[in-house]
Image (tube, rainbow, N blue to C red):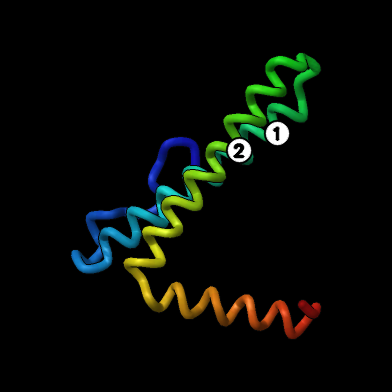
Amino acid sequence: MLSQIPINLDKIKKEDLDKEILRAAIIAELDAINLYEQMAAMTTNGNIKKILLDIAKEEKTHVGEFQTLLLKEDREQTNELEEGKKEVEELIGK
């Protein structure tokens, strides 16, 4: 993603705009996590690795914050996440 919103927000219905903004924010945070963890895996400098992994952890918190907001805004998303959880538990057990 690297600093580009993956959808054209101008084409989103007004009632869906906040949900799509939150989804774009989640994508950005996940992208940052991947980038920082990949760089941490590549460096041999312990200080750089430590800082990159710490920042990646903070980004995971941001994902949780945005997801919490999204689940408050989008009940369908909440229901589908629960359905997905049930399907996994049925397939692999609890």
Q: Position of residue 45 (x, y in %)?
A: 76, 14
Q: Secondary structure at mark 2?
A: helix
Give left or right: position of 59 versus 90. Answer: left
Give left or right: position of 78 versus 20. Answer: right
Badge 1 crowding class, 10 Å Cα cut-off, few under 14, some 14 to 19, many 20 or more, is some
Give the image quarter of residue 69.
bottom left
Residue 28 or 80: which is nearer the viewer? 80
- In this rendering, the answer to whether 46 lies above or below 56 is above
Q: Position of residue 87 (x, y in %)?
A: 67, 82
Q: Position of residue 1 (x, y in %)?
A: 49, 42
Give left or right: position of 87 versus 67. Answer: right
The dot on residue 38 is: 1
The dot on residue 93 is: none
Comes first in the chain, label 2 or label 1? 1
Q: Amino acid at mark 2?
A: Lys
The quarter of the image holding the C terminus is: bottom right
Name the residue that disc number 2 marks.
57
- Measure the alpha-carbon separation of dots 2 and 1: 13 Å
What residue is rendered at 56% in x and 44% in y?
Answer: 60
What residue is rendered at 45% in x and 74% in y?
Answer: 78
- In this rendering, the answer to whether 31 lies above or below 9 is above
Q: Position of residue 50 (x, y in %)?
A: 70, 23
Q: Residue furthest left?
A: 14
Give the image quarter of residue 55.
top right
Give left or right: position of 17 versus 62. Answer: left
